[in-house]
Image: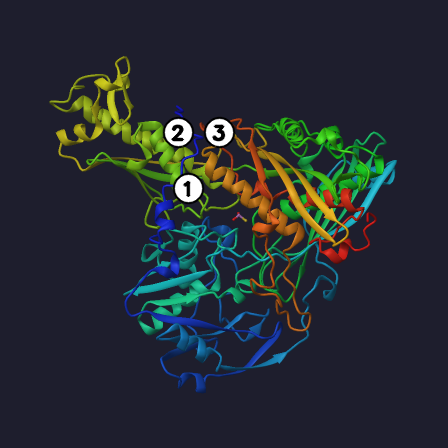
């Protein structure tokens, strides 16, 4: 089934609520009698709390209680990998003991009648520490730990040693901090032994499971509500300590408690993309054919959790090569626990791998696009499986034509536009495509509307709208008459908005539930007196434009479904379906692919580097909604430009403080940095993933941008930046003036 609504640029159905301010985000919910929690956070990176003196703060106006490790209610740990829905971000419950592992760790929570009172009192809580020298940067740590991931095929070391052409370089990416517009925050309300949490969550079902486990409250007594999320980029995938503290505070004072995370603590207590150090060795024949890829990665983690930035995820599959080895190690540091950030792993990983490939192309005097085609992987060489659907060659060709790649002259500084020097770069993008389980209820209502319900959520990606499009596709009910309820743990369980898997996961369940609801109407139609279809074979019926009719007759001859419901005085008929993971998962390798072509301009007179053009071509399966999909890719490219040129969280070596923990000093791309971006979807359905053939598009747009940009920068300036971000001081010795 497929009407024109699938793939159309349908405007977000939740858009009016958002632009009029009617959409309620987590901490917007107005509850009576609210109290406010403000955290006291550690000013050291390593040591012990010797004493917490709350006496002055307790006497301040409006202060109700001050919670810390000496008086906190016990919390539990999650079962973690043993339970399907119990992944927390930081495994150590807050206030567990007197140990400080990182700067910014919550050491106390002041609870007061107003936010200002809580904040003021928090500054009067006196914490004495026994401070130890922390390890804040990679170089502060002793040797990295043992490998946490090891991949090998062929004999990469030997092939590298004997390769006629070699590249051996080390690349660095900085810590990046997720900075969604909506900061983290929770309102907790207890009603007897039941707790409701208003959250900003990318995974309502997981949040529900974790809170049940860590608070020690039965699942049925926990209710998580997260109808709107002001984006997350990964930092809202799994719960953080403030959510538990809101629940603890509310239970203690027997009033609703709001704990929000201010912008400065967004840099310490709710995750970040860890920095990476990546040595890449490539061996190749004179014609550019790769004979060896060796990719060695280190990333810092915290002292309390082991979080791997999976940089080597694309290494075995992106390019064809017989001998590949990849290893990842962790380096525990006194900083907060890292967490996935948009395109985790692949984004820094491809920066290193694709940069090295470009360095090889330069060495061989080859066109960077040609070397990618030379090493095109026809199948997944890590498993030997065919790709379910791969059109990367078409993506390169489409992008090259659109960008005008054939006009490129390879010499450094050889392309000019007036006084400006132009640089061109190209990169590959890839991201795995997976599908998990989902359960959806679709209800056809007596008032002629349809309603869908699922405990997945819309983090700004367009889930609400895609649900409505699918229901409309299968019933002909216009999207204006379709209501979608998401972001509530009391609804049928749905997927986390993570890993670019949500759409592929919920599509089959939305489709199945819609068909089941329609079928229920058909059953009613053939079994009800006065129905024009009484006694008809239900298999001969069809629903078009919301009307039930015989397949061999015009839809205009049909009866509106609500008129059939009325014959039995029914308020609604439901379909509810649960679907599982990808049934063909074992026969195919499922990945999305793409490419970015980037142009920079370099003005050596004033040392100004600007991105002036970018064309992205994505092979990401069937596109369900051109508007929301394009928005995902453009947003990701903006973040890719941020990674390449601006973003970096800088820590003070002495105490682990992120010194640029604010929007003035932590630089993200803004309008002036972004040229007209182009995004082209190849739109080939990947039916291995499901009937609609959609793969995820949330993350792939960020992979491959940074290396295309450093490549373009090299082409313009002759400077190879291997340590992001590209700052102007790194371009000062430019060979092109
Ligand atoms: Mo994405 S980093 O899985 O939100």
**C-beta proximity under 8 Å, tags 1 and 2:** no
- Between 724 and 325, the one lying in front of the other is 724
Is residue 135 shown above or below 565?
below
* Residue furthest left in the image: 530
Q: Residue at x 61, y 62 (%)?
A: 302
Image location (x, y in percent) of residue 519: 27, 27
Q: Residue at x 37, y 40 (%)?
A: 439
Mark with earlier residue (1, 2): 2
Q: Is mark 2 within 8 Å of ligand 1?
A: no
**C-beta proximity under 8 Å, tags 2 and 3:** no
Q: Is residue 436 visible?
A: no
* Residue furthest front in the image: 418
Q: Residue at x 56, y 65 (%)?
A: 662
Give the alpha-carbon distance from disc 1 to disc 3, as whole Å: 16 Å
Image location (x, y in percent) of residue 296: 74, 48
Is residue 44 shown above or below 535?
below
Mark with earlier residue (2, 3): 2
**C-beta proximity under 8 Å, tags 1 and 3:** no
Is residue 609 shown above or below 158?
below
| Residue at mark 3 | 693
How dense is the environment of label 2, judged by Cα within 10 Å: few (below 14), some, or many (20 and up)?
Answer: some
Image location (x, y in percent) of residue 508: 41, 33
Mark with earlier residue (1, 3): 1
Marking on residue 5: 2
Q: Which element is circle 3 on?
A: loop
Q: Is mark 3 within 8 Å of ligand 1?
A: no
Image location (x, y in percent) of residue 610: 67, 48
| Residue at mark 1 | 463
**Residue depth check, mark 2 versus mark 3: number of the one nearer the observer:** 2
Q: Is residue 315 visible?
A: yes
In which image quadrant can residue 419 be found? top right
């Amino acid at each position: 089934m497929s009407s024109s609504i699938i793939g159309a640029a349908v405007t977000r159905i939740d858009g009016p609520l958002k632009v009029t301010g009617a959409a309620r985000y987590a901490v917007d919910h107005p509850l009576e009698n609210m109290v406010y929690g403000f955290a006291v956070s550690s000013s050291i990176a390593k040591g012990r709390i010797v004493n917490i003196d709350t006496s002055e703060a307790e006497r301040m106006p409006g202060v109700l209680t001050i919670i810390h490790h000496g008086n906190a209610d016990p919390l539990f740990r999650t079962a973690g990998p043993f339970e399907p829905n119990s992944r927390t971000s930081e495994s150590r419950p807050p206030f567990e003991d007197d140990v400080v592992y990182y700067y910014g760790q919550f050491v106390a929570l002041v609870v007061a009648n107003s936010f200002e009172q809580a904040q003021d009192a928090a500054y009067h809580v006196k914490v004495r520490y026994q401070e130890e020298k922390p390890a804040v940067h990679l170089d502060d740590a002793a040797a990295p730990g043992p490998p946490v991931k090891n991949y090998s095929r062929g004999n990469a070391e030997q092939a590298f040693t004997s390769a006629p052409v070699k590249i051996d370089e080390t690349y660095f990416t900085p810590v990046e901090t997720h900075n969604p517009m909506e900061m983290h925050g929770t309102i907790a309300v207890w009603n007897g032994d039941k707790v409701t949490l208003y959250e900003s969550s990318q995974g309502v079902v997981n949040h529900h499971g974790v809170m049940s486990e860590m608070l020690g409250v039965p699942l049925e007594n926990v209710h998580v509500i997260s109808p709107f999320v002001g984006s997350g980029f990964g930092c809202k995938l799994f719960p953080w300590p403030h959510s538990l503290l809101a629940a603890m505070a509310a239970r203690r004072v027997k009033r609703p408690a709001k704990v929000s995370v201010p912008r400065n603590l967004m840099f310490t207590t709710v995750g970040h993309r860890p920095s990476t150090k990546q040595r890449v060795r490539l061996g190749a024949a004179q014609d550019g054919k790769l004979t060896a890829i060796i990719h060695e990665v280190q990333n810092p983690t915290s002292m309390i959790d082991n979080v791997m930035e999976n940089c080597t995820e694309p290494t075995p599959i992106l390019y064809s090569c017989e001998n590949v080895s990849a290893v990842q190690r962790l380096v525990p540091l006194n900083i907060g626990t890292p967490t996935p950030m948009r395109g985790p792993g692949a984004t820094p990983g491809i920066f290193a791998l694709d940069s090295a490939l470009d360095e090889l192309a330069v060495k061989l005097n080859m066109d960077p696009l040609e070397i990618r085609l030379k090493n095109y992987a026809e199948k997944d060489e890590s498993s030997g499986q065919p790709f379910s659907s791969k059109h990367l060659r078409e993506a390169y060709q489409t992008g090259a034509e659109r960008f005008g790649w054939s006009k490129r002259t390879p010499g450094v500084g050889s392309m000019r536009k007036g006084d400006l020097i132009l640089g061109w770069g190209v990169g590959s993008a890839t991201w795995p495509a997976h599908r998990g389980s989902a359960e959806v209820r679709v209800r056809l209502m007596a008032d002629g509307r349809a309603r869908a319900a699922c405990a997945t959520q819309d983090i700004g990606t367009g889930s609400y709208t895609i649900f409505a499009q699918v229901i409309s596709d299968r019933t002909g009910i216009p999207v204006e008459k379709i209501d979608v309820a998401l972001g509530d743990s009391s609804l049928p369980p749905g997927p986390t908005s993570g890993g670019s898997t949500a759409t592929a996961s919920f599509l089959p369940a939305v489709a199945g539930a819609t068909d089941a609801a329609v079928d229920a109407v058909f059953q009613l139609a053939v079994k009800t007196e006065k129905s024009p279809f009484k006694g008809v074979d239900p298999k001969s019926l069809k629903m078009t434009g919301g009307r039930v009719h015989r397949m061999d007759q015009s839809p205009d001859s049909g009866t509106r479904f609500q008129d059939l419901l009325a014959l039995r005085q029914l308020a609604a008929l439901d379909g509810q379906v649960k679907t599982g993971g990808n049934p063909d998962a074992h026969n195919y390798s499922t990945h999305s692919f793409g490419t970015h072509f980037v142009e920079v301009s370099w003005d050596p007179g004033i040392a100004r580097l600007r991105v002036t053009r970018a064309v992205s071509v994505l092979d990401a399966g069937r596109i369900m909604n051109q508007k929301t999909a394009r928005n995902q890719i453009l947003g990701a490219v903006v973040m890719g430009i941020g990674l390449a040129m601006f973003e970096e969280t800088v820590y003070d070596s002495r105490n682990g403080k992120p010194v640029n923990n604010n929007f003035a000093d932590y630089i993200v791309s803004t309008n002036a940095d972004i040229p007209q971006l182009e995004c082209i979807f190849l739109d080939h359905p990947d039916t291995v993933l499901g009937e609609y053939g959609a793969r995820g598009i949330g993350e792939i747009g960020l992979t491959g941008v940074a290396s295309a940009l450093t490549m373009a920068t090299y082409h313009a300036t002759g400077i190879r930046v291997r340590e992001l971000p590209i700052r102007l001081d790194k371009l000062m010795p430019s060979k092109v003036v």
